[in-house]
Amino acid sequence: MHGHRYTVTLTVRSNSTSDVLVDYHDMHAGLRDILMRYDHRSLNDVMKKATTCENLAREIMVHAQKLWASVSCVEVQEQSNTGCRVLRDHE
């Protein structure tokens, strides 16, 4: 068994001209809560699908969209040159 260190980036998007889509403090707290499901745990025990970077990004997208409708992209990187980006279905 071995571990990975991932970097997760959420992107929010809107067609509106409102000043704030998501408060960054709220987003950081919410993302921290989402990531606690996976942090320092065997992904095989947590995820129902194969433990790929793509599936991890998809799961995070599902949880994030429950908190913020404006989430349009979740990017998960294993290293600076490897990772994936999952876009919202209608992007």
Image: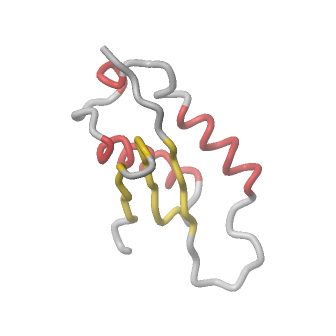
Counting labels gives 0
Q: How is the image coloured?
A: secondary structure
Q: Residue at x 49, y 19 (%)?
A: 40
Q: Residue at x 34, y 67 (%)?
A: 89
x%, y% of residue 28?
68, 46
Q: Is residue 9 left or right of residue 87?
A: right
Q: Residue at x 76, y 50 (%)?
A: 25
Q: Is residue 88 left or right of residue 51?
A: right
x%, y% of residue 68?
58, 57
* Image quarter of the N terminus: top left
Q: Is residue 17 left or right of residue 61?
A: right
Give the quarter of the image for residue 53. Answer: top left
Q: Nearer the viewer, residue 16 or 10?
A: 10
Q: Which residue, as the protein is rendered here, is positioned at the far left?
A: 50
Q: Is residue 21 left or right of residue 9?
A: right
* Image quarter of the C terminus: bottom left
x%, y% of residue 45?
33, 19
Taking 46 as reference, is 56 above or below it? below
Taking 88 as reference, is 17 above or below it? below
Taking 74 as reference, is 28 above or below it? above
Q: Nearer the viewer, residue 62 or 40?
A: 40
Q: Which residue, as the protein is rendered here, is positioned at the far top?
A: 1
Give the quarter of the image for residue 17. Answer: bottom right
Taking 48 as reference, is 56 above or below it? below
Give the quarter of the image for residue 24. Answer: bottom right
